[in-house]
Each structure stands twice: as structure tokens, then as C-alpha cells.
Image (cartoon, grey):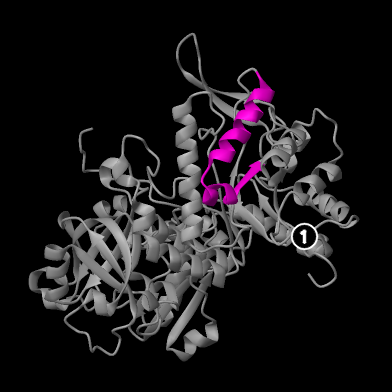
């Protein structure tokens, strides 16, 4: 099984995930790709075979007021192809995850259009890298806007309108307070979009009372037969939060203590929770899948979990008898 | 929208220091606004917001120093044949290169000299360091422990070199610090370069073994990170004791 992490590398100071310059300073996708090449070298060194690329990899690619940035993907065909070949040689599974501000089911048509453009752009990047179908663009349904059924229907309809290349790469994830696994199942039945099961979101939002393994199974089963599914896994934060709050009386900043919320990600993955989950999965006949670990310690969380699994439960690290 | 060219001089802006060893390459950088790196010899960190240029001995008064920098605009991967169309029969004409396109060359407020005659290839650093560096060794970005030890070296006036290749042309086998003593050479290597101490992250450049270092004519001193967390002065004393056994630190053959 692959264990991956999103975007930011913490294990090697100074590795950037993408070109972060503002438009005034001429950011370019090719600069992001050069940074990404350095990240891939790091991933290979650490034997990490799964990675989520930055959503802003192609800067301002769908910004309505900056059309000069809209052609960088085509312009970088050679560099994308070279980086894709590098990823393949490292057996690296890559993906994108749309930011929460990218809302395909928005009531505002302009926002929805921009979301569709961004999904298409990210699909074009994956195509340009010549990556297989397991490289997907993950999104959430979006807003409920007071009418969940209409919101789901609008997502499905907009999904239908996406260009084929974008639709083929899109995957849908359950969220932690609006759209449950049962909701995204409906979208899958309507559109065929594969589903990314998010373990922590499921624990936080499961109004239908689905069983864990049942929910996992339907999500895994939504992927095409020849494509290895993936899920998101994270542990809930249990540590106290310290928040800087400005005092209303004298405007001084002061730290206040807050108990953690159950939807917040922990810094690391609880190895016992992970072992328990994997062992439970192995008791039933499910397709093999990969884990995107969503922990605040990013790659360090992957390395940390791997160390613990090797010591506590080597069996949990591999599928089947020979991994 | 108004164009604003200058970013803040911050730590988040990445700089790659590269080498200019001919007037022709300097002219290409200044007039044609690009620099080339063969893919096969590209460093582990090639991505950068800026390039800065270390000039070698051919540059007269500007030699052995970083004097110029330029913003990066674009990375292209092209064959040497396309990059240098005047040399179509070159034996490496089909080799691939990064053609790094840059903005106009800007002069640094002060030049950053290399005091010791050492081979420089690539130095990944930040814009903040580029503007603050007094000499080439200030450019390397190390862990907190490494930085602490470097400050201790500077404060004590000891002529140490950072990230020094133990063999000519092998950037993979480097000492974190090198001291040149009267009767030998001392390589100081930090055991850990991790941001946190109990997660095993494989080093960017593998640690050389003591045996291998000896074979290359270096005395090796390994320091645990926790040694440096203790007052760096104590750490420095340990290094000095070893250096004394090698006849004491020699004055570098400056240019």
C-alpha cells in the first residue's frame, strides 16, 4: 500500500511545493515544476510513493482578470512530460485536491465556471504528465445553500457539463458537515464520478448511520475496475489549542486555551487507530487501495507512522501475503 | 493593475547560486537572459525564484564572488542542439539541459566573496541570506544546530568552510564543516539534519563513513545534534581539541 501526504514538505527545510510569487512578479508553471522535481527527488529518497500536488501549481491559471496566465500548461508540454516520466519511474501516485474556495455547485455561475476551469486545468496538467487514471482531482460537493438536494443536483449537472478530460479525472470526497458518504453515493450513481472515502469526515458526519466498512466498500467500489482507489485517513486532534485572541477591553493580544474539535487533524496519525482500521479492512474482501494521510506533520507523519507500523504491526503495511 | 517588480527581501524567496566561469556565459546571462544547467548534473534543488551568479577566476576584479542576481522567469528543458545552435556537432548535442530564463541582472548591494580557493557549484539559499551574507559560507541554509555552530565559528574567528566536498567534483560527499589544519584536514559532520529529532528522515547528502573520510585524507569528527544544542562553545572546544592534534587551524590561502 502507498502512504502519501499533501503538498508541503517538512522533512527537508527549504523545499517549496510551487511558485508562490504574486502575478506582478511573473510566476510560472515551469518554475513550479522545477520545485516539484526537487520534491520528487526527496520523496524517492524517503521511499514515499504518493503525493498531493499544490492546487496552485499553475499560478492564476483560471483567474478571470489575468488571461496571460491561462496558456502556461500548453506552454510547458515538454516540462510536464519530463516530470511525469520522473514520477512514473519513481512509481509515484499523484493527485490534486481543489481548495474549499473552488465550488463547482456554487449558486453564482461565475464562481462555478471558474471552478470548472480550474478542474479542467488540473486535469490538463495530469494529462500533460501522461499519468494514468489513478491520478485524480479530488473535490467536495460544495455548499448546501439551504437546499441540499438542489445543491447535489447542481453539482451533478455541472459535472456533466465538464469537458471529458476533466470529468475523467474528477473524484468526489465526503465532507464533515454537509455531504455524507450516502450523499456522494447519489452523485456517483448519477454521474459515475469515483468516490474518495475520508475516514475522519465519515466519523464526524454520518447522519445515515452507515457502518464504517459498508461506507468504505461503496466508495472503493465506485472506482473503475482497473484503477486502484485511494482514501483519506487522519486522526482527530486531541491536544489543547492555544489561540491568540485580541482582548476587547484593551486590544492586547492574549493566548486563550481551547479544547480540540473532533474534525481537526492531529499532527500525526494514531498508529493504533490505523492498525485497527487496516486489520478490519483485511477481514473482508475489498480491493487494495492507497492512503493519503492528512496530518499536520505532513511527510513526517508518513515516516512516523511507517516506523511505528514496522515495529508494532508489520502485517498492516502490506496487502495480501506478499504485499 | 499596476506592475510592481520588487518582492520583499524575504526568507521565503528561494535563490540558487550558480557558477559563471566564462565571459561568454556572463554575456548570455546579461544580454540574452538565460543560464543553462545540464539535466544530468542538476543539483538536488534546482527550483528557485532567483538565480545568483558566482564568478570564477576569469572575471578580474569581480572574481571569486557573487556580485549579481536575477529573477527567474521560466525553466525550459531543451537539447543542447537547440540551446546552442552554433554547435550542432558537439558530442553532447542531444543531451538535455535546463534553460533557465531570467530577468535583467541586478548588482548586489555588496559582493559576497569566497575567502578560500574552493570549487563552488550550486548553493541553494534564500533572498534574505543573499542580501545579508558577508561571505560565501553565510549562504548555506543549515539546521538550527548547524547554524548555531556556524555562528560560533564566526564569532571565534575560526576559518571554517561549510558544505565542503571531500573529493574534487563530488558534491554528494561533503563535510558540513571543513577546517584546514597545519598537519591535516578536519571534516565535521552533523549526525542529524532533521527538523524534529525522533523521526528518521534520510539526509539530502549521505553521511560519509569515517573509514572513507580517512582514505580521502580527512580526519572525521561526528557531532550528534544534541551536542550542539548544548552550548555551542562546548562543541567548539571539542572541535578545537581535535584541530590542535592536527597542528591547529591554518590561515586560509586567500585570493
Residue A215 placement, left or right of B7 = right
Which of the chains bears the disc numbered 1? Answer: A
Residue at screen point 85% across, 50% down: A276
- For the C terminus of chain B, the quadrant is bottom left
On screen, A283 above or below A245?
Answer: below
In this rendered view, identify the residue nearer to me: A20 or A136: A136
In the image, residue B190 lies in the stretch drawn in magenta = no
Residue B1 placement, left or right of B208 = left
In this rendered view, identify the residue nearer to me: A318 or A172: A172
Q: Quadrant of residue B118?
A: bottom left
Does the image show residue B233? no
The location of residue A129, given as percent across then percent down, is 48, 62
- For the N terminus of chain B, the quadrant is top left
The location of residue A63, given as percent across then percent down, is 37, 38
Q: Which residue is mark 1?
A: A288
**Circle 1: element type:** loop
Residue A247 placement, left or right of B107 = right
Q: Quadrant of residue B249?
A: bottom left
The location of residue A160, given as percent across then percent down, is 58, 40
The location of residue A168, given as percent across then percent down, is 59, 51
Q: Mostly what secondary structure, the magenta segment?
A: helix
In the image, residue A150 lies in the stretch drawn in magenta = yes
Residues shaded magenta: A147-172
Q: Residue furthest top?
A: A249
Residue at screen point 68% across, 45% down: A192
Amino acid at each position: 500500500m502507498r502512504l502519501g501526504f499533501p503538498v508541503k514538505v517538512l522533512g527537508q527545510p527549504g523545499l517549496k511545493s510551487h511558485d508562490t510569487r504574486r502575478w506582478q512578479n511573473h510566476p510560472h508553471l515551469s518554475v513550479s515544476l522545477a520545485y516539484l522535481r526537487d520534491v520528487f527527488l526527496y520523496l524517492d529518497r524517503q521511499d514515499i510513493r504518493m503525493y498531493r500536488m499544490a492546487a496552485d501549481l499553475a499560478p492564476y491559471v483560471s483567474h478571470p482578470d489575468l488571461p496571460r496566465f491561462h496558456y502556461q500548461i500548453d506552454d510547458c508540454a515538454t516540462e510536464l512530460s519530463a516530470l511525469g516520466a520522473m514520477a512514473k519511474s519513481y512509481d509515484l501516485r499523484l493527485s490534486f485536491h481543489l481548495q474549499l474556495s473552488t465550488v463547482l455547485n456554487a449558486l453564482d455561475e461565475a464562481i462555478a465556471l471558474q471552478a470548472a476551469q480550474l478542474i479542467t486545468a488540473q486535469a490538463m496538467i495530469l494529462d500533460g504528465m501522461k499519468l494514468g487514471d489513478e491520478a485524480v482531482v479530488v473535490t467536495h460537493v460544495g455548499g448546501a445553500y439551504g437546499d441540499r438536494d438542489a445543491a447535489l443536483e447542481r453539482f451533478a449537472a455541472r459535472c456533466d457539463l465538464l469537458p471529458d478530460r476533466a470529468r475523467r479525472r474528477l473524484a468526489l470526497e465526503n465532507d464533515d458537515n454537509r455531504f455524507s458518504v450516502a450523499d456522494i453515493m447519489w452523485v456517483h450513481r448519477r454521474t459515475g464520478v469515483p468516490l474518495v472515502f475520508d475516514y475522519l469526515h465519515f466519523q464526524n458526519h454520518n447522519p445515515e448511520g452507515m457502518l464504517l466498512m459498508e461506507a468504505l466498500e461503496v466508495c472503493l467500489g465506485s472506482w473503475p475496475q482497473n484503477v486502484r482507489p485511494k482514501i483519506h485517513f487522519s486522526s482527530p486532534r486531541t491536544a489543547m489549542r492555544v489561540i491568540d485572541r485580541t482582548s476587547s477591553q484593551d486590544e492586547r493580544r492574549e493566548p486563550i486555551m481551547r479544547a480540540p474539535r473532533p474534525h481537526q487533524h492531529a499532527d500525526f496519525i494514531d498508529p493504533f487507530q490505523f492498525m485497527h482500521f487496516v486489520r478490519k479492512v483485511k477481514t473482508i474482501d475489498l480491493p487494495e487501495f492507497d492512503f493519503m494521510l492528512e496530518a499536520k506533520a505532513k511527510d513526517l507523519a508518513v515516516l512516523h507512522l511507517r516506523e511505528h507500523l514496522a515495529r508494532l504491526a508489520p502485517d498492516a503495511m502490506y496487502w495480501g501475503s506478499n504485499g | 493593475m499596476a506592475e510592481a517588480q520588487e518582492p520583499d527581501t524575504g526568507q521565503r524567496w528561494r535563490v540558487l547560486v550558480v557558477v559563471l566561469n566564462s565571459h561568454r556565459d556572463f554575456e548570455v546571462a546579461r544580454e540574452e537572459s538565460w543560464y543553462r544547467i545540464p539535466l544530468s548534473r542538476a543539483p538536488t534543488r534546482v527550483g528557485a525564484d532567483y538565480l545568483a551568479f558566482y564568478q570564477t577566476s576569469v572575471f578580474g576584479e569581480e572574481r571569486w564572488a557573487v556580485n549579481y542576481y536575477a529573477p527567474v522567469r521560466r525553466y525550459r528543458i531543451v537539447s543542447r542542439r537547440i540551446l546552442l545552435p552554433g554547435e550542432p556537432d558537439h558530442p553532447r548535442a542531444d543531451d538535455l539541459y535546463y534553460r533557465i530564463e531570467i530577468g535583467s541582472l541586478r548588482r548586489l548591494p555588496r559582493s559576497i566573496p569566497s575567502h578560500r580557493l574552493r570549487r563552488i557549484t550550486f548553493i541553494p539559499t534564500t533572498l534574505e541570506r543573499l542580501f545579508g551574507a558577508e561571505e560565501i559560507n553565510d549562504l548555506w541554509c543549515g539546521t538550527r544546530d548547524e547554524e548555531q555552530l556556524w555562528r560560533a565559528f564566526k564569532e571565534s574567528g575560526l576559518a571554517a568552510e561549510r558544505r565542503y566536498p571531500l573529493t574534487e567534483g563530488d558534491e554528494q560527499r561533503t563535510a558540513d564543516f571543513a577546517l584546514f589544519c597545519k598537519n591535516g584536514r578536519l571534516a565535521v559532520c552533523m549526525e542529524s539534519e532533521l527538523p524534529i529529532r525522533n523521526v528518521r528522515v534520510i539526509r539530502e547528502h549521505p553521511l560519509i563513513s569515517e573509514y572513507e573520510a580517512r582514505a580521502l585524507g580527512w580526519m572525521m569528527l561526528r557531532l550528534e545534534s544534541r551536542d550542539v544544542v548544548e552550548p555551542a562553545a562546548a562543541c567548539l572546544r571539542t572541535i578545537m581539541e581535535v584541530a590542535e592534534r592536527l597542528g591547529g587551524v591554518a590561515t586560509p590561502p586567500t585570493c
